[in-house]
Amino acid sequence: MRLPVALVLSLTMATAAGLAAESSATTAGASSESAGASRAATVRAFSTVTSLDSDVLRMALDATVCARDKGAVTNDRLLTVIDYSKPSTEERLWVLDLQSERVLYQELVAHGQGSGDNFATRFSNQDGSHQTSLGLFRTADTYVGSNGYSLRLDGLEPGVNDNARDRAIVMHGAPYVNEATSKVVGRLGRSWGCPALRPAIARSVIDTIKEGSLVFSYYPDKQWLKNSPYLNGCS
């Protein structure tokens, strides 16, 4: 029995659409697997040359991919990771070149005086708290202020770090960030919430990461990890 032409065309189109959808799903699945494999390879590459925790790096890479997908970053080649779960006496800031898989900097970094002593345990988005903020930031422009050459940061996470501009949370050099101080006091000096660096290296780091790269500030804060729009599948 011959089928009506209209029905044949309808079935043909449906079959084609189904095959296209299947092909698209297969391609998307392969793409997802490829991206996952690529991130895993990047984590392995950096794990061999740095003390950066692999789980923290994995989260930072996921946040970077999400920010790129959201159009929130203009320079996704460079990624700065700060692990505030480490004591201030340890190097806990890394600047990574994701394209060449090189560690450009591994440095000491201070946290806010309201966040804790050697270990930071309290974090805030509130002005006057003198606490460090967590989450994903985008670097902006530079200026010379009371702390010398400084880099403005834009917080990308509402309620977590989006008051960074109003709070003047910037990256800058500070004389209290040095190993001699940490040996005498048992910790680095502390900022008013800014990620402060050694004066000798601050300008070089700032000029490397300024104008559109990402800074991922980590601490195992359950609420932030659960609700961040850049983690957990880029919700």
Image: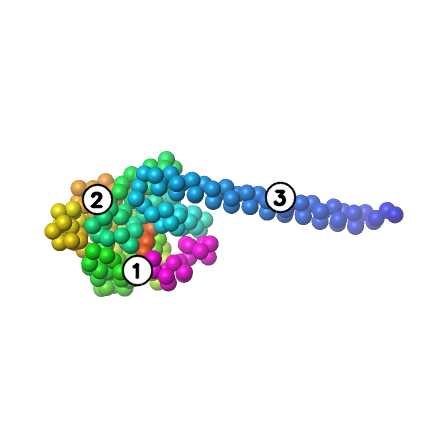
Type of amino acid at the residue the image marks with label 1? Asn
Magenta region: 220-235
Q: Is residue 231 above or below residue 31?
A: below
Q: CA distance from mark 2 to mark 1?
A: 23 Å
Instruction: Identify the image quadrant of residue 166.
Output: bottom left
Name the outermost residue toward the left. 184
**Does the residue at mark 2 contact the one at mark 1 (Cβ under 8 Å)?**
no
Say few, some or many: other residues with alpha carbon within 10 Å of mark 1 (under 14 / 14 to 19 / 20 or more).
many
Q: Which mark is residue 60?
A: none
- Looking at the picture, the colour scheme in use is rainbow
In percent of width and height, residue 13 lies at: 72, 47
Element at label 1: loop
Q: Is residue 233 visible?
A: yes
**Which residue is label 1 attached to?**
163
In this rendered view, identify the residue nearer to me: 235 or 49: 49
Neighbours of disc 2 within 10 Å: few (<14), some (14-19), many (20+): many
- Between residues 183 and 21, which one lies in front from this camera angle? 183
- Number of numbered discs present? 3
Residue 44 lies, in percent from the top left, at 39, 41
Q: Which residue is mark 2?
A: 202
Report the residue marked by disc 3: 23
Mark 1 or mark 3, which is nearer to you?
Answer: 3
